[in-house]
Structure formats: C-alpha cells, structure tokens
Amino acid sequence: MIESNLPALQVVLPLIAAPLCLLLRRSTLAWLVAWSASWSAAAISIAILLKVLSSGTISYAFGGWAPPWGIEYRVDPLNGFVLVLVSVVAALIVPYARRSLLAEIRSRQHYLFWTAYLLCLTGLLGVTITGDAFNVFVFLEISSLATYILIAYGQDRRALVASYQYLIMGTIGATFIVIGVGLLYLMTGTLNLADMAQRIAQMPLVRPELAALAFLTVGISLKLALFPLHLWLPNAYAYAPSVSTAFLAATATKVAVYLLIRFMYTVFGQSGIFDNLPFEEMLIALSLAAMFLASIVAVFQDDVKRMFAYSSVAQIGYMTLGIGLANASGLTGAIVHLFNHAVAKGAIFLLLGCVALCVGQPVISKMSGLAKRMPLTAAGLVVGGLSLIGIPGTVGFVSKWYLVMAAVEKGWWWLAGLVVISSLLAVVYVWRLIEVCYFREPSQKMSEAKEAPLSMLIPAWVFVFACIYFGLDTSTTVGTAAIAAQSLLESMQ
Amino acid sequence: MRGFRVLRVIAKLLIPFILIFGLYVQFHGDYGPGGGFQAGVIVAAAVIFHALIYGLPHTRRVLPEWVVETMIAVGVLLYAGTGVAAMILGGNFLDYSVLLHDAVHGQHRGIFLVELGVGITVAGVMLMIFYMFAGRARSKYSEK
C-alpha cells in the first residue's frame, strides 16, 4: 500500500505536517514535526528515484481518475533527481535551523515559520512531481506564498520590502505562467503535460502556441531569476533569515529551472516550434549576460549574503546556458549544475548563518580574521567558494566541464572560452572574502566570537563534504543527470 | 456603535440567519450551487458583521484568535485526512470511491468531508486576515 502510494505521500506528508505545526504552537514540537516530515520526505524521494532508475517512469493517478482526465503524478529520472535534491536539502536544514531561528526570530513565531517552511516544501515538491500543467501553477503559488513569508521573517526591516518586491514580481511571473497554461489548454484541450506534448506535436504551428511559449518562458524566467528578471533575488536573499536564504537558494530557483526544462523539452520538444525561432540563441545570450554582469556586480557588494545572491544569478546563467545549448553534454551539465550549485550555495549560506549567529550580519568589513576565531566556518566557506569558481576536485568543476564540452561539441570555442573567463570573475569575489577572513587581524567584535555550535556546523559541513565528494565521485550525480538528459532528448525526436 | 440600538438589534437578529445560510450553502453544495469556499466566506462575513457592530474586542472574546488559527489547520487536516483515509482503505490518494460500501456513496461522503474542510479553512483564513488588518489599525490609534 505504502509503496504504490509513494508519489502522493511525497507531497502529502509535508502538507499534513504544516497544519500540525500550526496546531501544536510550541516551538520545539513544531520543530520535531518539521524534522520528521522532512526526513521522511527525503527517504520517500530516494525510494522513488531508485524505483524510477530501475523500472522506468512512475505514473500515479490522483483520486483514482485515469490520466489524462485526472491529475497525474509522473516521475521520470529528471524530476526524480530534482525531488531528491529538494527534499534532502530541506531535511538537512531542519536540524541546523533550531539555533539559528532562536537567534533570529521571536520564539512565539517559530511554529508559524515551520508551517511556512513545510508549505514551501510541499509546493516545491508538488511542482516537481506533478504531470499536470494547472497543478504546476497551483503548487507554484503554494511555494511562492510560503516563500514570501519565509523572507519577511528577516530581522532587518528591509526584509519586508524585499518580500513585497518578490511578491509583486512573483505574482507577475505566476500570472504569465497561468496565461501560458491557459493558452495551451485552449489549443490542445488537455492539461496533462505528456498528453499536451503529443497533441502539440500533431498540430500545425499556430500563433497561440508561440504566445503560450513566450508567456511560459517569461513567467518561469521570473521565478528562476534569469537575467534581467533577477531584480527581486539579491534583496530577498540578503535580508531573509539565514535558514530561509539557505533553503531558498538551494531549492526554489532549482525547481524553476526544472520547470523550464520540462516545458522546453517535454511539452514543446516535439512541436518543431524552435525551428524558426532564435530561442536557444536568446537563452544563451541572456545566460552569458547573467554570468558576466551578475558576477561583476557581485564583486562590488559589501554585504556577503548579497554578494553570493548575485553569484546565484550568475550561476543560474550556467544552468540556462546548458539548457540553451540543447545537446546531451549541455543538458547533462545544466541538470548536474542544479545539484552542484544547490550543494555549494547551501553550504555557503548555512555557514554565513553561523557567522550571523556568532558575529552578526555578515558584512565583509566585519568578517576580518574570521579564520582565526571560527576556523571550521571559514574553511567551509573556502570550499564552497572554490566550488563556485569550479576548481577541479569540487562540484563546480564537474558541471563547468560538461558545459565547456557541450560548447566544444558544437564547435563554439569562443563560448567555451567565455565560460572559463566568467569563472575568473568568481575568483575575484571569492578571493575578496578569503583575503578578509584569512589575512586580516580580527576586529574587536570578532576577537570575542567563538566557533558556531555543532548543531549548525554539522549540517553545514555535510554540504561542504558533498561539494568535495560529488566533485571526485561523479558517478551518481552525472550518471543520473545523463540518463535524464538522454530521456529528454529522446522524447524530442 | 454603542448608541445605535437599531443596528445592534438588527445585527443580533440577522447573524443567526447568515450562519444558517452559510451552513445551507455548505451542505447543499453537493446538489446545487454552493460549496465549501462560498460557505466559508459567508460564515466569516457573519463574524465580521458582528465585529463591525459590536467592536473587535468583543468579537475576539466570542471567537479568540487561537480558535481561528485552529480552524485554518483543522480544515486542511480534514481535507488531507480524507485523502489519507482513502489511501489506507486501499485506493489512491483522494479516491473517495473506497470510503463507503459502494462507489457512489463513497464519492458523496468524500466530497462532503473535503468541502467541509475547505469551508472551515476558508472561514478561518478570511477571519484571520480581517483580525490582522483590523487589529493593526486599532493598535496604531491607541498609540496616539
């Protein structure tokens, strides 16, 4: 019974846990509920991925109504991989969050934070697992609304403005997505993504399809913060509580990238809509702009969280670059970079949360001498930074290697060169941090600081170890990503 | 509104009828127009009406904030719980057909429970939004 219902339980468990947190009201009890729900969700997602890899795509009919009429949950290697990423990251952050929340949020609001956290997780998992276009929109709204709350809990009053800014942009994005879905429904008469893909492939190309593609692309790009639609992201990440920043940076934009892949390849893949459209060129141009401009802006930030937020915009550029390249290596690089960037940014933002706990708002001038007082935190930041640059032996290298390969396979040597040059920009901002942390004397406040508690350091260092482990042993991540890329490209023919 | 006797009496007369109409919309949703969302809004409107006439502090005593918060959670749990019950009885999530001895009755029971959950949560959320906005203005004026 449980095994056949795993796809539903994946989403339903956190959905049930969220109101439970609201009922229990106690900070500790809510935390325990969040702990058990997120770890079970992680176990379920791993079970689902293993099942998909061994026996092929899973389809689950919601409410017993057969697809394409009812809502279908459909897991293939691609979204199985993303499910594991989202739920494992969420599970690792929960034990970390206890101390960080005590320091940053009033304890009588903790249960509300956990409710929003679990609802956000529900939404993100739902977007990933569902095979129904309207369901995608519904879950996207659940996760977005919860995200606005998670951001608004920031101590800084600017968190409210940042959250509001994201609310406006996010709502515009969601509206565009629902208009796109509506147009597709109008044209095909179905909401099931797989069914929709087949019908679009058989239809002559008409203008509403182009409009649907345009609406969906712009809407999803707003959500994933593709340059130049990234304006909401730096403030949201900078002023949100440390826990929210780490969770959102590692999961929310990744799910949006998944959604872009899903619509571009699965839904529109067979339609031939891209034959007369400079879609891939446009995506590559915007990705390059993100990689360079966002990295340059990152170099000049004083707030370290803001700096890494701009770096996230740049790193998202690498993912969309891989999607735009549209060959096996590029797509593999994009999918594996979803994972690799989540791991690296998760590590960095969790460690910045440790800094926030022990020293205060992580501003670059206040972090001088960090390595002397908090050696483990500083060392972890260095490893995370090296992954962002793409030094061999870290996860960042693996994904950039595949992107360079993809560019070379197309014969675009200039693009391979640009990927490498943009990595040099990451060196600049990461070095700025290392220089302050390692080669300056501790400031007054820093010299009183102690290393962060183990309950925070251990989850953060799990991410740091993952940065190195998956940089050396790429068989799991790249293996799964390659299978996913293969199945996407096959479905296009 | 202390001086407006007419308003206070009319409100006292009307509120029970609004609540009954809310229940009618809730439970008649299976056969005619209506359903959980509309019913939840109507019930919430009755309470908001009470607050407009008798003042927010009074309404907060009748329906404290923690009750409203519990309503929000209970409705969602009722919805999801119905789904899980279907799972335990051997169907898929939210497959109401297995809830009772035959499929038609099962579907009926399932929709009934789910709509009740929707109604409770919608009423709770509407009231919470109202409490938040109304309470905010009050604390602002009391500071002056």
Image (cartoon, grey):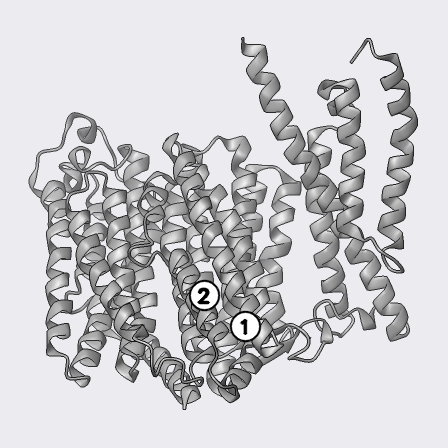
Circle nearer the N terminus (2, 1): 1
Of A469 and A346, nearer the camera is: A346
Q: Is residue B137 above or below residue A217?
A: above
Q: Is residue B59 above or below residue A182?
A: above
Chain letter of the residue beneath label 2 in the structure image: A
Q: Is residue A136 visible?
A: yes
Residue at the spot of label 2:
A216
Measuring from the top left, give residue A119's x and y in whole percent.
55, 52
Chain letter of the residue beneath label 1 in the structure image: A
Which residue type carries mark 2?
Leu
Q: Residue furthest left?
A: A439
Residue at the spot of label 1:
A184
**Rendered residue at 35%/38% (across/down):** A239
Q: Quadrant of the C terminus of chain A?
A: bottom left
Q: Establish whether labels 2 and 1 are both on one chain.
A: yes
Measuring from the top left, give residue A112's x and y in whole percent.
56, 40
Q: How would you rate the neighbour count of disc 2 (Cα within 10 Å): few for under 14, some for 14-19, many for 20 or more? A: many
Which residue type carries mark 1?
Leu
Asked whether, in this view, residue A289 is left or right of residue A345, the answer is: left
Asked whether, in this view, residue A194 is left or right of residue A402, the answer is: right
**Residue A71 in which image quadrant:** bottom right
Q: Is the C-beta separation of discs 2 and 1 under 8 Å?
A: yes
